[in-house]
Image (cartoon, rainbow, N blue to C red):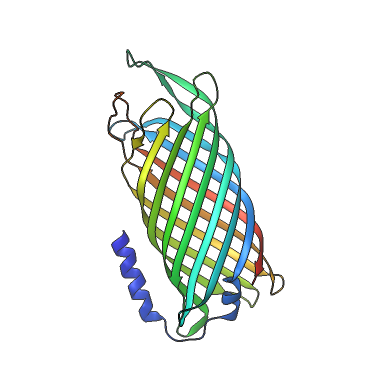
Amino acid sequence: MLKKLSSILISSLFLVGAAHANDSIITSNNQMSIDIGNHFLDYHELTSGGQGYADSEVGSQPAAKLSIVQQSTFLGVKDIYTALSYEYSRGLTDYTGALQNLQTGATTPYNTVTRNATSDYDLRIGRSFAVVGYTDVQVTPFFDYGYHSWSRFPEGAYGYQENYANQEAGLGLLVQYAVTPKLVVNGELEFGHLIDPKMDTAGSPEFILHSRASNSLAFGVDYAMTRTVHVNMSYQLTSFQYGQSAVNSQELFEPDSKTAVQSVMAGIGLHF
């Protein structure tokens, strides 16, 4: 998938040229913003063979996000795009799973509520280009690096905390369109891969998970109330998978899993 996106990014360069970048898009791409919204988590651990679900965490949590984006000249190169963000969510999900007797292997269905906390750091670096013949459109191929952490603690007598973490690197394409001098809409697509995924919990050695793909799709709207004050809305869908760990010294392992996260955010930004 990364090879396919690389080909798309390279091909897109033939459609862009030295056209002057759109002022509305440049203004939108030089601001600091704060957003609040909803983080919807859909997590499933898979049974051996991947034919069913061993357990799941599903639910939404309130979220907040800080971000800063800049499009400027760096070392004589125009329209260098950089973006840095941090998103945090905290709240409850519904746990559906089972309790297992480690001596007999027998399982008993078990449902409860889980406390969750998620942090996501993201850094993007790219180069923006105006599309020849369409100066109100801008495309930005970018490299993305991120760090993700998630802690979950099912409530009740059988609850215990698990902490997941991974890095991520990928390639993406951001497309922006200035509908009016004040309104800019955007869409982006990214394909990446997890780096160093792991899970730890008290009383057990750390589980080293296998790296899998990570994909992201997002849409957004930025409206300039004044040149300085902007309001925005965004939607993002991110999906990734963890591969099964090796069996540890306690004869335990972390199974294959898949995660889908949807974020809907709205906020205010200040142009600089």
Foreground: 206 or 124?
A: 206
Q: Residue at x 43, y 39 (%)?
A: 164
- Please identify the quadrant where the C terminus is shown: bottom right
Q: Quadrant of residue 180?
A: bottom right
**Spot occupied by residue 194 in the image (x, y as percentages of width and height):** 36, 50
- Please identify the quadrant where the N terminus is shown: bottom left
The furthest residue to the top: 104
Q: Quadrant of residue 223?
A: bottom right
Foreground: 75 or 98?
A: 75
Residue 78, above or below 95: below
Q: Residue at x 35, y 46 (%)?
A: 196
**Spot occupied by residue 266 in the image (x, y as percentages of width and height):** 64, 56
Q: Quadrant of residue 253?
A: top left
Q: Is residue 47 left or right of residue 40?
A: left
**Spot occupied by residue 228 in the image (x, y as percentages of width and height):** 69, 72
Q: Residue at x 57, y 68 (%)?
A: 185
Foreground: 75 or 62?
A: 75
**Spot occupied by residue 168 in the image (x, y as percentages of width and height):** 39, 53
Q: Is residue 64 left or right of residue 256?
A: right
The furthest residue to the right: 226
Q: How many marks?
A: 0
Foreground: 202 or 186?
A: 202
